[in-house]
Image (cartoon, rainbow, N blue to C red):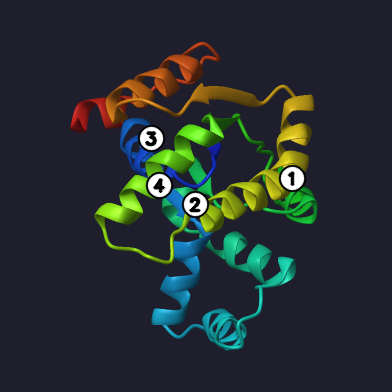
Amino acid sequence: MSRLLIVGPPGAGKGTQAALITTTYGIPDVSTGDIFRANIKNETPLGMQVKAILDRGEYVSDELTNNLVKSRLEEDDAREGFLLDGYPRTLEQVRYLDELLASKGQALDAVIQLVADQDEVVARLTKRALEQGRADDTEEVIRHRQEVYARETTPLIAVYGDRGLLVEVDGLGAVDEVAARINEALASRGITATESSVETA
């Protein structure tokens, strides 16, 4: 089973591709957003901490985020493989993840980076906002989100690039085309769909 991470700018279809990857490779989608929501819903001690922070409109700290991810990765379905989505977001979280996996004799196999021309993504999201009547999603707001993403992820991408883990994939195009590019890029690194997922597909 594979240990993967996916990154990509807002509007590049990361969520859609993450769902396809987890099915194809037989690994769970470990999304920090989902982890936060599940812990809050189940009223776990960590979840109550997260809820209080979010209710105040503040960011969840690296330490708390790390603890939540650690707890999720220790669940049975994620012990041998997973797809991380939305984590790590800071260099401190990268260091923590490195140490956590190393303590189990594990490491990331690849980091999938969905690459998309910013102007095309902005045009796509602006059109979607108009179609869905989302007046708050102006071009200015959408461009700001793109800039925040670039600023936050550039240091992480540099780290994983230096380690030779980065797999760049063009994120624009039909969903199945992008999925095929991802599968091909991973296959070139010896990462293939699991037998169990092929049997159940």
Q: Return the disc, 1 or 3, that comes first in the chain's sequence.
A: 3
Looking at the rendered image, the disc whose residue lies closer to the viewer, 1 or 3, is 3
* Element type at mark 3: helix
Looking at the rendered image, the disc whose residue lies closer to the viewer, 1 or 4, is 4
Q: Measuring 21% from the left and 27% from the top, which residue is drawn there?
A: 199
For the C terminus, the image quarter is top left
Residue tagged by mark 3?
21
Q: Position of residue 195 (x, y in %)?
A: 31, 24
Alpha carbon distance from label 1 to label 4: 34 Å
Looking at the rendered image, the disc whose residue lies closer to the viewer, 4 or 2, is 2
Looking at the rendered image, the disc whose residue lies closer to the viewer, 2 or 3, is 2
* Residue furthest top in the image: 188
Alpha carbon distance from label 2 to label 3: 30 Å
Q: Return the disc, 3 or 4, that comes first in the chain's sequence.
A: 3
Q: What residue type is disc 2 on?
A: Glu
Q: Nearer the viewer, residue 63 or 137?
A: 137
Say few, some or many: other residues with alpha carbon within 10 Å of mark 3 (under 14 / 14 to 19 / 20 or more): many
Q: Position of residue 22 (x, y in %)?
A: 37, 40
Q: Position of residue 101 (x, y in %)?
A: 68, 45
Q: What residue type is disc 3 on?
A: Ile
Residue tagged by mark 2?
139
Residue tagged by mark 1?
98
Q: Is residue 178 above or below residue 144?
A: above
